[in-house]
Image (spheres, rainbow, N blue to C red):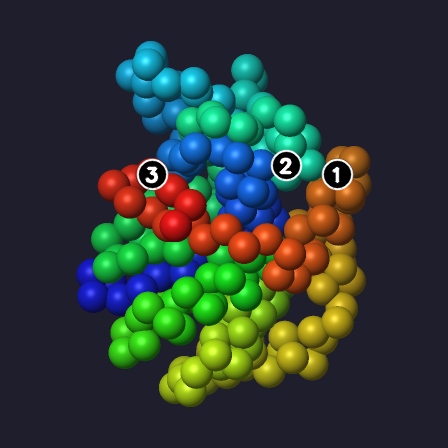
Amino acid sequence: MEDKIAVVLDVLLATSTITACFSYGAKEVYPVVDEAEARSLANKMVNKDVCLVGEFDGQTIEQFLDPTPLSLREHMKGKSIILSTTNGTVAIRKASNAKKVFICSLLNGRAVAKEIAQAYENETIIVICSGSKNKFSLEDFYGAGYFISQLADEREIKLTDSALTAKLFYEQFASESKQMLTESKVGKKLTQIGIGDDVEFVSMQGIITVIPQLVNNRLINY
């Protein structure tokens, strides 16, 4: 993967949350693999205004903020965020050896696609769906299709069969993103625990223009 551009999606919710945090004014986001790494890193960042955000297996980690986009709106400006999630931040870290790593969601997929189309014309792009506990997730497949469709609108691209399938699937249901997310397994679970408003929010397409990029294991807004 070292010579490729990675685009990571965890639509429900990590990459959507990261996108939202930067739109709220976060300075940087450190994606970590678990609670222990998050606490260890926070202890080393004594000179920064740090905010711990995270969940494991759908439960907010004790003494951490809930990693849902709408709940974080008033807490992010100027902060260094340490984020730990079950799937998304783990996938980001696994992709860290790529040439470049971009964070994508329905919220910012258009902006990410435009940046990659302009800056990485002759590069191989790998779209990584975080999934849910190493299993297929509808929302990430749909989000991947959205990104690929946006990229195809910007320039001519060659697609693998899986990428083409995601693109065609998205384009068939392009106007039904809210339904796609709310009907997914994770979307139903999130709605049941009372954060259906967040699911609806992150289903909106192209409303945020931030382009988070991984640099030395921290995310910055490009």
Q: Secondary structure at mark 2?
A: loop
Asked if 5 appears above or below 200 in the picture, the reply is below
In primary-sequence order, the first of circles 3 and 1 is 1
Quarter of the rendering occupied by the N terminus: bottom left
Q: Residues within 10 Å of mark 1 (few under 14, many from 20)?
A: some
In front: 65, or 48?
48
Whole-angstrom CA distance, mark 2 to mark 3, is 20 Å
In front: 208, or 160?
208
Q: Mark 1 highlights which residue? A: 195
In primary-sequence order, the first of circles 2 and 1 is 2
In the rendered structure, the answer to whether residue 89 lies left or right of residue 74 reads left
Q: Are marks 2 and 1 in contact (CB under 8 Å)?
A: yes
- Residue at 52% x, 69% y is 147
Looking at the rendering, which quadrant does residue 30 occupy? top left
Q: Can you give x and y, in whole percent of width and height, for residue 49 in the image?
A: 43, 18
Q: Mark 3 highlights which residue? A: 218
